Amino acid sequence: MGRLCRLSFFMLLLIVTGTGLPIGQAAGKGRDEEVSALRERIAVLEDQFRRLLAELVDARRRLEELEKQRRVGDLKALNPEISVILDGVGLAGGRSLFRRFQGFQFREAEIALQSDIDPFGRAEGFFAIGPDGVEVEEAYINLIDPTILRLPKGLQLKAGHFKANSDKINLIHRPEQPMADLPLVHQRFFGEEGFAGTGLRLQYLIPSRRYTEVSLEALNAENNSFQTPDGRPVLLSRLRTVWDLSDEKADRTYDLGLFYAWGSNDAGTNTQMIGLDLTHRWRPSRQGLYRSLSWQNQILLSQQGGAGASKGIVSFLEYQFSRTLYGGARYDWAGSPDKTGTASGLAFALTYFPSEFQRYRLQLNWQRVNGQPVREVWLQGTWTIGVHRPHPF
Amino acid sequence: MMHLRGSGLFLCLAVLVVGLSSSLGVKPKIQVVATTGDLKSLTELVGGDRVQVSAIMRGDQNPHTVQARPSFVVALNRADLFIRVGLDLELWADQLLQAARNPKIRKGAAGYVDASEGISLLEQPTGPISRAQGEIHIFGNPHYWLDPANAKIIVNNIAEGLKRVSPADADYFERRQKEVFRDLDKLLEETLKEMEPFRGTKVVAYHNTWPYLARRYGLNVVGFLEPKPGIPPSGRHVAEVIRLMRMQGIKFLIKEPYYEDQTPQLVARQTGCVVVELPSSVGGLPGTDDYFQLIRKIIGILTKHFALVKSP
C-alpha cells in the first residue's frame, strides 16, 4: 500500500514536472500575445472613440448652427436691447432743514436703446421721460470699425447728440450718478443736464503700454458756460491716461484726465475752460464683491471774455462696506461762470443695493449758496428693468 | 585691455545675434487674450511656444462682477485672438471689446472664440424668464469648464481659433491638441477613480457654480446659500438651509474663495458641517497654476474632506 502510494506520488510529480512546465510556458506566451492583441484593440478603440468624439462635437456645432439659424429667423432677434431706469426722489430742505418738505418727485424714466447697426457701427439712444416731457439725453452712432473709412487702427468716431467728454462725472447719466444731485461745480458751470451737445467726436487710443487716449470734439452745446447761437461749435479736447498698479491682491488704478474747451457764450464773448480730474479706484481681488473704494477729484477753471477766472473743485469718496451697502462723502466748492457768487458744501450718502437692479439712497447736504445756508435731505430710489449692460469704465 | 577686448567681442556677438534673428525673421507670437485663467491655461497647452497668452480675470475673482479696467483695452487692441467663456458670464467683456476697436477680434471675426460652442449646457431655462428668478443665466449654466470632458470641447474651439489666425501652424496645433486630449483622458480617468467611493455625497453650495462638476463626479448638490442666483443670503433662507442640512444629515458646505466666510461659518456652527473652500478657476487657490492642477486640487480637497467624515 505504501509502495503504491509512493508510486502514485512519483507519477503525479512526473506529470507535473514533465508535462506541466511546457504547458505553463505556452500559457505565458499565450497571455503575452493576448495582452498585445488587447492593447492593439484598445488603441483601435481609442482611435474610434476620438473620431466619434470629433464627429459628435461637429454634429453638436452643426445642430447649434441650425438652431441659431432658426432663432435668427425670428425677426425679434434684431430688435435693439432695451432697458429702463426709473428714478424718483423725495426732498426736504431749504434754508432750514426739516421745516420744508418739498415732496416726492418722479424725476425721470430713462429709456436706453442699444444695437449694432452693421459690422462697422453701433447706435445708442438714451431718452429721459420726466415731468417736463421727453428729452433726448444722448443719441449717437459709434463707428467702431474704422477700416470702413480706412482710418488708422485705434481711431473711433462718434456722431450725434452726446455728453461732452470733459470729465468722468459728466459722462454718467443722472440716475446712475454716485449721489442724488450733481456736484455744485457741474450744476453751476453746466446746469442740471450737464455738458452735452450735438456734433462729432474723434477718439484715438495711443499705441503705448499704458491706456492713453486723446479725444477731439466739436459740438453745439447750450449750458451755463457755452452758448452756440451762431452755430459755431464748442471745441473740446481731452487727454486721459490710466496707471494700472493692480497685482494679485487687488485692482488699483489711477485715472488722470485733462481737458480744454473753447467756445462762445451768451455774453457774446468766448469762454475758455480747463479741467483736471484724478480718480483712484481700489478693489481687493478675493473680496471684491464686498469691498471697494473710489476717490474722484476734479478742478475746473473757466474764463469768460477778459474777466478773471472762476474755479470749481469737487472731491468725492465712496467706500463699499458690504455686498449691498456703500457710503459716500463729497466736498465741493464752486464759483460761477459769470462770477456772481460762490457755493460750497458737504454731502454724505448711504446707498443700499438689494440687488444689482435696485438702489435706495439717503443723502444729507450742508451747503452755502451765494451766502445763504441750504440744508437738504434726499431720498432716492432707482430701479432698472430690461437688459442692463455694465457701466463704462 | 583684455576686459575691453572681451567686452568688444561680446558686443559684436550680441549685435550679430540680434541682426541674424531680425534678418531671419523670427516669427512673432500670436497674441491671445483670454477672459479667464482656465482658458489661458488650455490655450497655452494647445498653442505651445507659438502663443503669448494673457488673462483678464484672476482666479480668485468673482467672474460675474469683474470690473473692466482700461488696461485690458490696451491688451485687446493688440490681440490676434480673443477667447471667452461666453453665454452671459462675462457681460463686462462686451464693453472692453467695443472700446478695443480691434476688428480682428470682434464677434464673428476670425480672432473671436466663444469657448462654449458645442457644449451641452445644463440648466437652460424653459418657459418665461424674468429677473424675479435672480441673476439667472438665460442660455444655461456657464460654469462648464469644471468638467474635464468639456475641456476637450474647449480645447477644440481654441485650436480651431488658433488655426484660423495662423493657418501655417495648423499641424503644430493639431499635434498638441491630440496630446492635450490624451492628458485630459488620463486626468478624467484618475480623478473619476478617486471620487468613485464618494459618489452621491450630498453637499450644499454657496452659489450654483458646480453642476457640471457634480454631474461628472456624482456630487449631489441639494441646496444653495444664495436664495436665488446672485442674491445675497437672507436670514430666513439661511434658516431654511440649516433645517434642510440637519434633516438630510448633510455634512459639507462648499464655497468659492471670493464669497464671504461669515454665513458659511454660521451654518457650520449650527449644523456641525465642514466648510470646504474650492477654487472654481485656475489661480483660485495656491497650487492651481494650470487647468490640470485645478481639477486635481478640487478632487483632492473633496476626497480629503469626504474621507475624514466617512471614517473619522
Image (cartoon, rainbow, N blue to C red):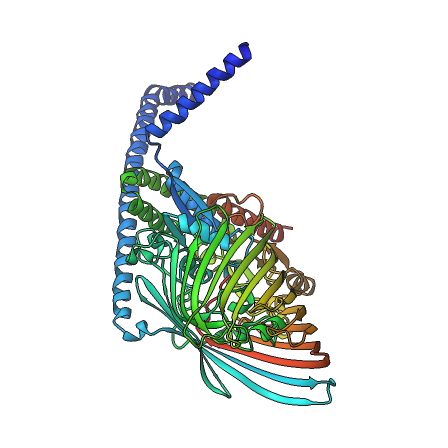
Q: Nearer the viewer, residue A173 or B194?
A: A173
Q: Quadrant of residue B88?
A: bottom left
Q: Quadrant of residue A349?
A: bottom right
User: With A377 as the anchor, is B87 left or right in this view?
Assistant: left
Identify the residue at horizontal 68%, vertical 89% (top origin).
A101
User: With A203 as the anchor, is B6 left or right in this view?
Assistant: right
User: With A157 as the anchor, is B236 left or right in this view?
Assistant: right
Q: Residue furthest front?
A: A306
Determine if residue B253 is in view: no
Against B79, residue A365 (above or below) is below
Determine if residue A310 is in view: yes
Image coordinates for residue A90, horizontal then vertical, percent: 62, 85
Against A138, residue A30 (above or below) is above
Q: Nearer the viewer, residue A166 or B277?
A: A166
Identify the residue at horizontal 65%, vertical 72% (top origin).
A335
Q: Tell me the quarter of the image containing the N terminus of chain B.
A: top right
Image coordinates for residue B48, horizontal then vertical, percent: 39, 38
